[in-house]
Image (cartoon, rainbow, N blue to C red):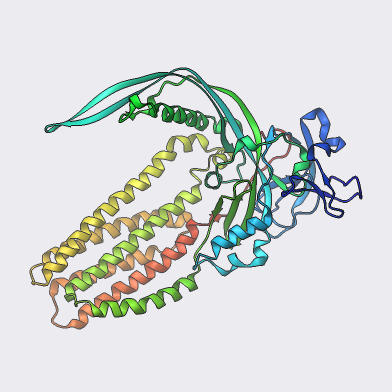
Amino acid sequence: MYQCKSCGGNLEFDIESQKLKCKYCSTLFDPYEVTKESDGYEEQTFEATYFACPNCGGEIYSTDNAAAGFCSFCGASTVLSSRIERELMPDGIIPFQITKEDCKKRYLSRVKKLVFAPKYMKNPESIESFRGIYMPYWKYQYTVNGEVSMPAHREHRSGDYIITDHYRLSGDVNAAYNGFTFDASSSFNDNISEEIAPYEVRAAKTFTPSMLSGFYADVADVPQDVYQKDAENKAKDSVAEAMKQNPEFAGLTVEKDKMDCPQQLKSVDRMMFPVWFMSYRDKDRVAYVTLNGQTGKMSADIPVDHLKFMIFSLILAVPIFFLLNALPVLPFQALLFVSTLFGTLTACIFTYEISMIVRRNTDERNRGMLWKQGKLNTARQGNKNVSDAYENQFASVMSIVIIGGILCGVGAVISAQETGVGLVVIGYFIEFVIVLCMFFFVLRKAKKYKVSGKFSLLYTLFTYVVAFFITAIEPASDIAYYAGVILVLVGILANLLIVISNYNKTVTRPLPQFNKRGGNDRA
């Protein structure tokens, strides 16, 4: 701890004054004039107190030695174990600009607008758990000096032909890029760091340990080469965007992936950026709320309260009931068919959420965590392919759903003249195949990723079979059609409830497990 020279009280960094402030006499001190004798050891390290969570292994450190009573990463309310170690001096730091009070106001302003947000996320006591943490970042500086060239093309129509003209763009570039940043902590999810970016790196100051007083810092444990290729690509993208601004290149489509760019890595700096951090724990899941401590940009995992959703749905059902009664009555075949179409839609939404859960739980876009687990090389080769595979699968499914929907609509209208039963039956067959494919997809993922609801898809398939036979035999009694519609609606309701349950899994995260190491070899 840093002591006040006037009264001996503890000094903490004051965000409003950007100076160290005594908690007792309110005297202000310049952070660069307050040091500890141990801070100057070799002029490259400083003494810090490390706090480790006994549940998940996550680590944070501070220049203070006050006990830390909860873990920011897994949300566990437990006293973190502590030890004294030495940490490498960062090259720069962006001090907190957003106070805790401003942070809470911004969060409350956002969460109050969310009708279905759980009550505990609006609890003032929970909001008090916002913790100021400096996150470690790598800052890459690149220079581009020389001739840059890349292919480009332009398409135009001539009669029945589309002609593509190919070009080779080139130009002399002399530029410097100093601000490509990536978080250097495996415990800080890359998706979160991207959502609260960017930071204004020109506002960074020379690091002094006293700026950490009153705050915590996350451990830098990801080496610089993990993100070096990403920084190179950002430099290329910046050069390509600058070249596209040339009037002579207007209307051309550039091929940045094939660009020859003589970029050179000048330096990689260790930085610390401010983040307000809060976690909510619900059984085996955790939700994070993070806020950029410089700009106030926020990233929040907000689940949905089941009870609030059901109450809202029941209230909304009343005007919809009267609206439907005011509309012309659909033929029974059409009504049953349209009901199954909504069932297919809810099944598609449910299956899409399963893919999002898979993506979230595998952390396929979290480079730092993948490196920590020794999976980075495999992830880099397969990351894009895995994501594209999911997107292509669901793009295909939705395309089929649209075609099936058109058949449904046409069949429903024609069936009013008693000539469209065949088309309706074809529509049922298409829907059945779609949901059957989704069932097998979910079945493969359900056990591994602990997702629920696969049996609701079986029920949906059952309702399609019932609807198919009702439509095919064309019973004289209306009761059969009503029974079919009720069966389908029960399936839709079940799918919607499961959608909400799985949505909460997509916006929360599995409890983290870290394997941190102490010492100065982290970065």
Q: Nearest the camera: 499 or 304?
A: 304
Q: Quadrant of residue 253?
A: top left
Q: Nearest the camera: 387 or 320?
A: 320
What x and y, as percent, mark residue 126? 65, 64
Q: Is residue 237 visible?
A: yes
Vertical arrangement, residue 406 with respect to residue 381, above or below: below
Q: Is residue 425 visible?
A: no
Vertical arrangement, residue 296 with respect to residue 330, above or below: above
Q: Nearest the camera: 31 or 43?
A: 31
Vertical arrangement, residue 362 with respect to residue 224, above or below: below
Q: Quadrant of residue 490?
A: bottom left
What x and y, as percent, mark residue 455? 37, 65
Q: Is residue 458 left or right of residue 181?
A: left
Quadrant the C terminus occupies: top right
What x and y, as percent, mark residue 498? 42, 66
Q: Residue at x 52, y 36 (%)?
A: 376
Q: Is residue 78 left or right of residue 379?
A: right
What x and y, as percent, mark residue 421? 12, 68
Q: Nearest the camera: 385 or 206?
A: 206
Q: How many numbered marks have been drawn onto this rendered protein structure?
A: 0
Q: Residue at x 45, y 61 (%)?
A: 502
Q: Is residue 13 left or right of residue 290?
A: right
Q: Is residue 304 left or right of residue 77?
A: left
